[in-house]
Image (spheres, rainbow, N blue to C red):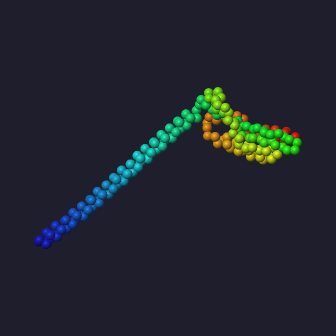
Amino acid sequence: MTNEIIIAITSTSFVWAIILLILLTNIKKKNIEILKNQEIDFEKEKNQILDRLRTEKHSEFNKGYELGTGESDFIVQVEPYKNTIGKKGYFQNSQVMEIGYIYRLFVKGIPSLDPHIQIVEKIKISDLNEQNVNSAIEKLDILISKIPSPHLRLVGNVKDFGTKILKSIKTKRK
């Protein structure tokens, strides 16, 4: 009888130990699942905060950009420039054409400061051909287009300016 009681107690203890292990593993699984859900919720909340920050930053940038590109009290006026220097002689042609642009600052429509002449290229008349002029005009157009200001106003068309230069040179050669 004592053997039977000992066997019953040990088998009951063994069953209770198995039940306890099953309960502990279920509790661990639930805790792991709860932690995963908390991590997912945390990541969602973090992403929402980051999205709000990005949209707020973008909207603030757009507000500043709109204010900056809006009507201003100043404007920079840019126009093409050409100047022929030298004389056309009997034995030697010593003319040089300077091609560039003039820019000037206007405050509330009134010129302020003197205009500044920026020479982009100098071409000798004897070396002048349409390719040289077109190359200089393209450089000028690229330079003017890269000026990063919304307050810039270009007076005239650069390509029309180039054709006028070619016409004036052709008439001077004749």
One can see residue 129 in this view:
no
- The answer to which quarter of the image holds residue 172 is top right
- The answer to which quarter of the image holds residue 151 is top right
Q: In the image, residue 107 lies at what x, y percent?
A: 62, 29
One can see residue 35 in this view:
yes
59 or 145, which is in the foreground? 145
Height in image: 84 above or below 23?
Answer: above
Q: In the image, residue 147 lies at what x, y percent?
A: 64, 40
Q: In the image, is 70 to the left or to the right of 33?
A: right
Please identify the residue farthest to the left as the structure is shown. Answer: 1
The quarter of the image holding the C terminus is top right
Name the residue rendered at 73%, 44% in the picture. 121
Name the residue rendered at 11%, 71% in the picture. 2
Q: In the image, is 173 to the left or to the right of 12?
A: right
Name the residue rendered at 80%, 40% in the picture. 86
Q: In the image, is 131 to the left or to the right of 48?
A: right
Number of numbered discs visible in the structure rendering: 0
Q: In the image, residue 20 lies at what x, y percent?
A: 24, 61
Name the residue rendered at 86%, 41% in the picture. 89
Q: In the image, is 32 to the left or to the right of 148?
A: left
170 or 93, which is in the foreground? 93
Q: In the image, residue 1 lies at what x, y percent?
A: 11, 71
- The answer to which quarter of the image holds residue 149 is top right
